[in-house]
Amino acid sequence: MIGVAEASKWVTAYVCLAVLFGIGVFIFAGPQYGGEFFAGYATEYALSIDNLFVFVILLTSFAVPRELQGRVVLIGIMIALVLRGALIAVGAVLISTFSWVFYLFGLFLVITAWRLAREKHDEDDSKEPGTVALLRRFLPVSEQYNGTKMTIRIDGKKLFTPMFAVILALGVTDVLFALDSIPAIFGLTKEPFLVFTANASRSSACPSCTSCSARCCSGWSISRRASRSSSGSSG
Amino acid sequence: MNVPLWVWISVLVGIAAIFTVSLFSAARPT
């Protein structure tokens, strides 16, 4: 995984690229669509901040070796972007066919906000994310990594490596976050092209942002969780 | 907003290029 300085440079480059793209939309498609892209991009970026911390928790839960972390996050985000694209396509078709679906999206956002407001914040941070617990329950995952390979054969039995499990967990978690961010962005624009490009712009910067967060959190409570996970439940 | 197919394809190719570059960058030994 890259350092904070290099990650910051990558994030800056991706933000500049997104701004240039937005300016292009502004010039070629008009100020309305340009504004909608920037509003959507800002919303996606703001909503992705909490993803980053969940990604760091996932990396520490699976005790991912530092040299594999960058690749793991990147592949997870790539899978998530494909799934997000599918969600956007479904959302766009639903909205264009049944206009009342738009109100359903709104209701879903209100319910999400209500649940977040009522959520009790437990001081104990030792609990694993739900996706991790679910994966451990249903996937035969080995204790050890096998380089960058997704499977390993132990005593003739083929097992998935933690590398595979963490990539899957990252992808699934990112899509779960998309369930509220995509309806939110459809509230700003009904153009699937703008919704997708705002998502892609945000996703491209995500691995570098995760690197930054992981490095910044390394001396914080996340490291306590990592030490607990690696000594207890990793694999 | 009527987005031509070539714009969609260009955007998808651009995203694929960005992720490929990032993947090689992430795979590089540190």
Image: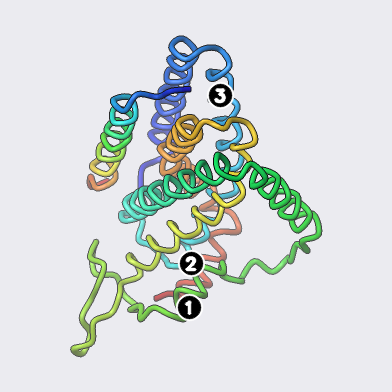
Q: Amino acid at mark 1?
A: Ser
Compute the Cα span from label 2 to label 1.
8 Å
Q: Are marks 3 and 2 in contact (CB under 8 Å)?
A: no
The residue carrying pointer 2 sits among few (fewer than 14), some (14 to 19) or many (20 or more) residues within 10 Å by Cα, namely many
Mark whose residue sits in front, 3 or 1? 3
In percent of the image, x 67 and y 45: which residue is there?
A100
Residue under label 2, please give it.
A61
The residue carrying pointer 1 sits among few (fewer than 14), some (14 to 19) or many (20 or more) residues within 10 Å by Cα, namely few
Kindly indicate the quadrant of the structure image that contains residue A85: top left
Q: Residue furthest front?
A: A97
Compute the Cα span from label 3 to label 1.
42 Å
Label 3: which secondary element: helix
Same chain check for tags 3 and 2: yes
Depth check: give the residue in front, A154 or A130: A130
Depth check: give the residue in front, A68 or A90: A90
| Lower sequence index among marks 3 and 1 | 3
Residue B7 % position (x, y):
33, 24
Residue under label 3, please give it.
A38
Q: Amino acid at mark 2?
A: Ser
Residue under label 1, please give it.
A233
| Lower sequence index among marks 3 and 2 | 3
Kindly indicate the quadrant of the structure image that contains residue B12: top left
| Lower sequence index among marks 2 and 1 | 2
Q: Is A143 located above or below residue A175 in the figure?
A: below
Q: Are marks 2 and 1 in contact (CB under 8 Å)?
A: yes
Is A40 positioned to the left or the right of B7 in the image? Answer: right
Residue A102 % position (x, y):
65, 43
Subunit bearing disc 3 = A
Kindly indicate the quadrant of the structure image that contains residue A122: bottom right
Q: Amino acid at mark 3?
A: Phe
